[in-house]
Amino acid sequence: MKPEKKQTENSRERKIYRVTLVGSAVNLLLVIFKFAAGILGHSAAMIADAVHSLSDFATDIIVLLSVNTTPPATKEEKPRYEYGKHETVVTVLIGLALLGVAIVIFVDSAHRISSILSGTAFQRPGLIAVVAAAVSIAAKEWLYRYTLRTGRRVKSRAVIANAWHHRSDAFSSIATLLGIGAARAFGGKWVIMDPVAAIVVGALIVKISIELVIPNLGDLLEKRLPASEEHRILEMISSISGIQDPHRLRARNL
């Protein structure tokens, strides 16, 4: 490998490590803060939000491992796309993690709604839970923008997917803030706003999960390009002098 290319690859890995380490540190702090706020503030919604942040921390570790397991370049260097499969696998795993979080949100919210409608009383959450939700929204939105910008700059689908996981946690915290705010302000049946908002957020998380999993799963299975794209490639090949009647084209995303 040429020194310039090797330096570029090393710089790319350093940027991925840096943005992911920053994210994991923030997520770890949020997990501790949210769990404490949920327990001290008597808020089940905040404890659930802390679990969501814990899933973010787990995906940060997956991204770090994906960078670490990318094979180093050798004298007989293989095409870069062979190594890109590692990031594709990680992206699918993050998408599936998002789907798992959404399912947990749906089940927990349905249980809470059923309990509230049946007359079960819930204690009003403390102010610390409201503060934790607000801090989480600000921190996760900043992480989303920072991570997405870096992911696009280094062209890493795994980092971009992780950015969307940060955004999903910000959405979750918004629902938590609305629910906790309503519960503190009005009490009684108004606590039902928390699980209802969580279900809406869960639907958004499912949408993001599908957008991450389906196209990358197609890449892993080496799904062929769309017919229109293959037709365009055949036209380009036919325009080359000396080539006649090209056929049986096999193409896939790199």
Image: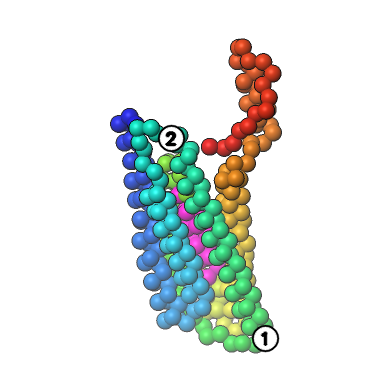
**Percent x, y for residue 1?**
34, 31
Position above or below: 156 against 240: below
Say which residue appears at 40% left-offset and 46% top-offset.
70
Magenta segment: 159-176
Mark 2: give few (<14), some (14-19) or many (20+) Cα within 10 Å: few
Q: Position of residue 180 (x, y in %)?
A: 52, 75
The residue shown at (49%, 44%) is 85
Camera-side mark, 1 or 2: 2
The question of residue 167 being in magenta is answered with yes
Name the residue at 63% across, 32% down.
Answer: 250
Please tell me which of labels 1 and 2 falls first in the chain. Answer: 2
Residue type, numbered disc 2: Lys
The residue pinned by badge 1 equals 118
Secondary structure mostly seen in magenta is: helix
**Residue at which label 2 appears:** 78
**Residue 218 position in % (x across, y down):** 61, 45
Spatial CA span between label 1 and label 2: 62 Å
